[in-house]
Amino acid sequence: MDLKQKDLKYIWHPYTHQKNRPPAIPIVKGKKTLLYDEYGNTYIDAISSWWVNIHGHGNKYIAKKLFEQAKKLEQVIFAGFTHEPAIELAEKLLKILPGHFSKIFYSDNGSTATEVAIKMALQYWFNKGDAKRNKILAFRHSYHGDTFGAMSVSERGTFTIAFREKLFEVIFIDTPDDTNFTVIKEEINRYKNEIACFIYEPLLQGAGGMRMYDAKNLNSLVAFLKKEKVLCIADEVLTGFYRTGKFFAGDYLEEKADIICLSKALTGGTMALGVTACTHEIHEAFVSDDKTKTFFHGHSFTANPLACTASLASLKLLQNDGCKEKIEAISTLHEDFLKNLSPFVKQNVIKNLRKTGTICAFEICTPQTDNYLQDIGIHFSNYCLKNGVYLRALGNTVYIMPPYCITKKELKKVYKVVQAFLFSIAKKG
């Protein structure tokens, strides 16, 4: 059996319809923006391999640092022991995070980072003796992960329908705009002194359809909630590390979160790692002679030395002026690309063109309601693959989120393939 046949026999892939599924493409090598399959075909990875790979594949600097660390210490239990990569990474992150954070709690990925944040916020109030504060506030159309706590604070929909009866109660509100802020405040006031925390994806709701919203109104909402003593949790798993144009999406806001969650690009897409940072005030609620106030949470690979080392290497690359110039160049090229798509908007082929930082998106117009399960997304992705580009649509939502090392020539090829697909739709009418 070749790799495709073995994969079909043994592997269950994520977010993949199982009946009559096409064989997965065996990737044997990655270099910068390119993925190479076993037949020698190449694909421009225009979504950074699920939004994680910001420096491209096979980065030599990160690989060198990993090799050096692997020879010294690859893994050690993080209860009772510590190590230099974890300490150095925590120290560096606390200096650049958007807020007044004092402690770093490590976990394994984005979903666990949000689980930690939710548990931390709920136990904060428990430890403070305020049992009434046990409700959670979240945005509609949100996505915070696939573990049960993360699913509970995410949009009730396709991803969670099988588990709906098992998810805990959450108060859902719309993202704020100039017209609905009064309604949102009224909804929050219905639960006055009962809300423990508010979890949100700042400025960009990723898996919910690359939904973008205004920093000014989010800032007003966070300010209002802070006055009501609600802990604010910023899920920056996607938005961190310049994805929205600034180092963190929270840098656009004057009001800062009490807890922040990081993952995805944290390690430059090299390894799995999650971070949850909190303020001194939150940590102090867990410092007590009463041992039941301990935060009983952990993972076998908490603060894995290799993952922490990869993160340190990625941070160093990010802070180079050359990287920032590339990020700005991608943003500018996206703007020009979206302008060139205006004829397709007039023909009702696409709608809702938008951009933030290195991410641009739009919807393909279909007779059905916007939905993750629409077949148009599969047709689009297959067309792109046949033309040497990897783009994975969210239903009828098309987005481009490339690694920062992508060249102008490569990005223009991505745009050209997308436009060719839209031409084919327009031609069919």
Image (cartoon, rainbow, N blue to C red):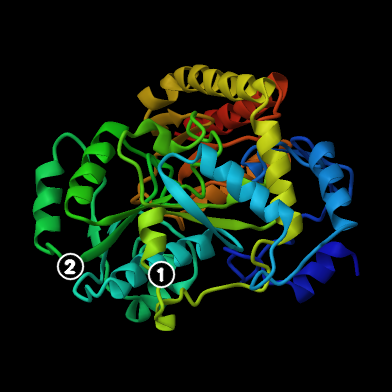
In percent of width and height, residue 193 lies at: 14, 64
Q: Which residue is mark 1?
A: 286
Image mark for residue 194:
2
Camera-side residue: 35 or 425? 35
Camera-side residue: 341 or 89? 89
In percent of width and height, residue 386 lies at: 72, 41
Query: In terms of secondary structure, where does tag 2 sit?
Result: loop
Camera-side residue: 403 or 5? 403
For residue 333, side relative to residue 222 (left or right): right
If the image is split into quadrants, where does the N terminus sit? Answer: bottom right
If the image is split into quadrants, where does the C terminus sit? Answer: top left
- Name the residue located 42 percent from the left edge and 33 percent from the top edge: 251
In percent of width and height, residue 298 lies at: 57, 73
For residue 287, side relative to residue 28 (left or right): left
Which picture quadrant has residue 32?
top right
Image mark for residue 24:
none
| Residue 240 visible, this angle | yes
